[in-house]
Image (spheres, helix red, strand yellow):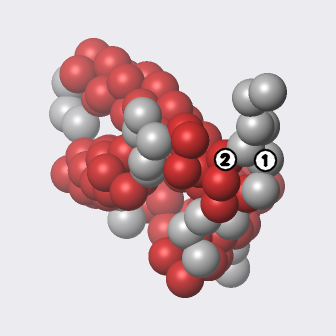
């Protein structure tokens, strides 16, 4: 996606034209997101906010993508595969995020306030 964005996006059935600058930037963003996700696997407490971000970002991105694909006469299989991958990342992030354990999270960060 960063080196040959036309080929990468073309494999998903999307034509990026002669100047795929935005698509290359987006490829870089996806690579950066993957690197942070990998760091989160190694040290999840430090990257909790990233997992929360992924839940929201992937949810809205999947909704937007699905809405577009459903309106297409022929939705590329590759695009559906991307949606599936993004949905998986969002669901996995939601699964590892410590919902409802804010006392523990505050303790991990040393931010727990002691009530008098």
> Which residue is depicted at the point 23% across and 22% down?
70
Pointer 1 residue: 111
The answer to whether residue 88 is visible is yes
Residue 88, relative to residue 113: is it above or below? below
Q: Nearer the viewer, residue 73 or 81?
A: 81
Horizontal and vertical percent position of residue 72: 27, 24
> Total of numbered circles in the picture?
2
The answer to whether residue 14 is visible is no
> Which residue is depicted at the point 37% across and 24% down?
63
Q: Nearer the viewer, residue 27 or 45?
A: 45
Tell me the element at label 1. Answer: loop
Q: Residues within 10 Å of mark 2 (few under 14, many from 20)?
A: few
Residue 77, relative to residue 64: is it above or below? below
Occupied quadrant, residue 29? bottom right
Q: Nearer the viewer, residue 114 or 75?
A: 114
Q: CA distance from mark 2 to mark 1?
A: 5 Å
Q: Residues within 10 Å of mark 1 (few under 14, many from 20)?
A: few
Q: Nearer the viewer, residue 92 or 15?
A: 92
Tell me the element at label 2. Answer: helix
Query: Pointers 2 and 1 in contact (CB under 8 A)?
Result: yes
> Which residue is depicted at the point 60% across and 64% down?
45
Horizontal and vertical percent position of residue 3: 68, 79
Residue farthest front in this picture: 116
Q: Locate the C terminus by quadrant.
A: top right
Horizontal and vertical percent position of residue 7: 51, 70
> Which numbered circle lies on residue 41?
none
Q: Is residue 71 left or right of residue 32?
A: left
Occupied quadrant, residue 92? bottom left
> Which residue is depicted at the point 55% across and 82% down?
42
Pointer 2 residue: 106
Whichever of labels 2 and 1 marks the residue nearer the N terminus, that label is 2
Horizontal and vertical percent position of residue 10: 44, 60
């Amino acid at each position: 996606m960063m080196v040959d964005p036309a080929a990468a996006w073309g494999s998903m059935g999307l034509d990026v034209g002669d100047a795929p600058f935005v698509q290359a930037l987006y490829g870089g963003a996806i690579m950066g997101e993957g690197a942070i996700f990998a760091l989160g696997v190694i040290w999840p407490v430090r990257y909790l906010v990233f997992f929360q971000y992924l839940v929201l970002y992937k949810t809205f991105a999947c909704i937007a993508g699905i809405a577009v694909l459903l309106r297409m006469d022929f939705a590329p299989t590759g695009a559906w595969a991307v949606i599936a991958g993004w949905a998986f990342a969002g669901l996995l992030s939601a699964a590892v995020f410590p919902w409802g354990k804010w006392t523990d999270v505050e303790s991990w960060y040393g931010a727990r306030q002691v009530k008098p």
